[in-house]
Amino acid sequence: MDLKDLYRDVILDHNKRPRNFGKLEPCDSSADGNNPLCGDRLTITLRLDGDRIDDIRFEGKGCAISTASASLMTEAVKGLDRSAIQNLHAQVHHTLTDHGGALPPAELGKLAALAGVREYPARVKCASLCWHTLDAALAHVGAPDAASAASVSTE
Amino acid sequence: MTAQGYDVARVRADFPILATTVRGKRLAFLDTAASSQRPQAVIDAMAHYERTSHANVHRGVYELSQKATDAFEGARERIRRFLNAASVREIVFTRGTTESINLVAQSWGRRLGPGDEILITWMEHHANIVPWQMLCERTGAMLRVTPIDLRGELDVAAFEALLSPRTKLVAFTQISNSLGTVLPVERLLAAAKRVGALTLIDGAQAVAHQRIDVRALDCDFYVFSSHKLYGPTGLGVLYAREAVLADMPPWQGGGDMIRTVTFSGSTWTELPHRFEAGTPHISGAVGLATAIDYLESLGIDAVHAHEQRLLARATQALRAVPGLRIVGEAAHKAGVISFVLEDVHPHDLGTILDAEGVAVRTGHHCAMPVMDFFDVPATARASFGCYSDDADIDQLVTALGHAREVFG
């Protein structure tokens, strides 16, 4: 197995120069994600325009897979509404875990670069942490304690 | 190359797993601190027991049950001799180091109350932190923690200052699993005794790498796991000084630990069985006894010298890798090297090294306070055993160069 399938140029680039890195202040919702087993942590802040994500940022510390996955995700979900995000999350999840070796669907765009993770089961949670954190942030919108961040932890 | 006639090639031939390949590459197994591999002798002894001698122990009058009991109790005697304990009544079988510590916390710990203190160190494995935290929550006792410095040395002066007549137990590791630091055990034990505290040594990282003599140490508890001593998983040992153990209430109830059972109450059997409820890991005990025979046939001092030579060689080689920082540079270390590589997260490093056949642990090593202290999310850790060799180190260094290329 070639490591280049995992650490593709897109991944290495987004790890070195993460897009949408930082914090939105003020924001409509935020969530902290952490992966206790590896110590990866990230915080997502987002602003909504109706049901669509108007702007989104992330910050935190993690491995190349988790940083690149979060960076790629923020690019992909900007402008999407909840149902489109849910749809995209499902496709990403399938791509990360499908051992059938099928090509990632075309709608994934640059996110398809994460497909190499499927050969490294121990690393799937690195790539999926940001998506679970985004889910938590969206579920948290309008909650009574919306001023504080929701949190999610993957094992 | 061999040190004082230590023939590592012959030792390697005793471990069948070392002949396997990983992702098409020679296996460089550098994760012995997490779990050691097993020699053929251990695998054979366990299989032989299962084929010829298995029945439940301490129960039947038939010959097979007696054979199993002899094998199991023979293993206990072998462990007593290995530790130089005074009596087999002081050797309790558990599931591992973690369970041994929990046994002490839940049984001996019942006597603690508000105003009492337990003293540990900053470099403990979670197994020697969390049971004490839980005990303190239950009893109102307080947990004190001895600080460490940036080299990974224990602050012995602070340790001595933290001791007081309130200190009821001092529990510390003999060798840090995350930093490799060898603690000044004799000095810590002497200081603990001056205030009348009991002492527990976590020997998980020590038993396979240096000679242990619990009577010379004069500690109250000594705990370790079989699987870090070339034996099987699922088995550990609690050594407890007889006078201390005799005064402890049972912790798990069931078969094998009772003398009589009636619905108006039960009475407990003698030591050490009082602390061994249920059917034990009989084949595991046979395997551990064989692992001890094996290690002693190599000579623990010879193994120690071999691992110290590897430690020196690997430390020198890793220091020469650009961007690599060793975490934990105590003056006195065992064959454990934690490190981080600039701009490469330890988990990415673990994956890249794996692709080169190099097995190292990456993560927090069940020592999150140590990671926080050094302000790293995780480290990569290479650790050595009796079968580790120069080729393992060379393969690690080459793979680290490859990681730098990928992330260059």
Image (spheres, rainbow, N blue to C red):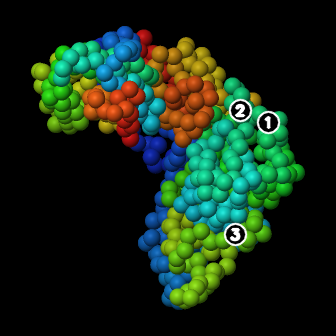
In the rendered structure, the residue with mark 2 lies on which chain?
A: B
* Label 1 SS: helix
* Residue type indicated by callout 1: Ala
In screen coordinates, is B61 left or right of A1? right
Label 1 marks a residue whose chain is: B
In the rendered image, which residue does mark 3 sit on? Answer: B248
Residue B280: x and y, percent? Answer: 52, 70
Name the quadrant of the C terminus of chain B. Answer: top left
Marks 2 and 3, Cα distance to the nearest angstrom?
Answer: 32 Å
Q: Residue at x 33, y 12 (%)?
A: A20
From the viewer's side, name the closer residue of A67 and A76: A76
Q: Extreme front residue here? A: A144
Q: Earlier in the sequence, mark 2 or mark 1?
A: 2
Percent x, y of residue B282: 52, 69
Which mark is on residue B158? Answer: 1
Residue at the image point whose x is 67% and y is 38% from the top: B122
Instruction: Point out which mark residue B148 bears.
Output: 2
The CA distance from mark 2 to mark 1 is 9 Å
At 62% across and 46% down in the image, what residue appears? B129
Kind of residue indicated by mark 2: Ile
Q: Is residue B97 above or below residue A75?
A: below
**Marks 2 & 3, CB-CB < 8 Å contact:** no
Question: Where is residue B162, by image quadrant?
Answer: top right
**Crowd tier of the residue under label 1, counting other residues whose Cα lies within 10 Å: few below 14, some 14–19, many 20 or above:** few
In this orientation, which residue lies closer to the viewer: B301 or B354? B354
Q: Nearer the viewer, mark 2 or mark 1?
A: 1
Element marked by disc 3: loop
Q: Position of residue B398 (x, y in %)?
A: 48, 21
Task: Compare marks 2 and 3 and give the one earlier in the sequence.
Answer: 2
In this orientation, does residue B203 appear? Answer: no
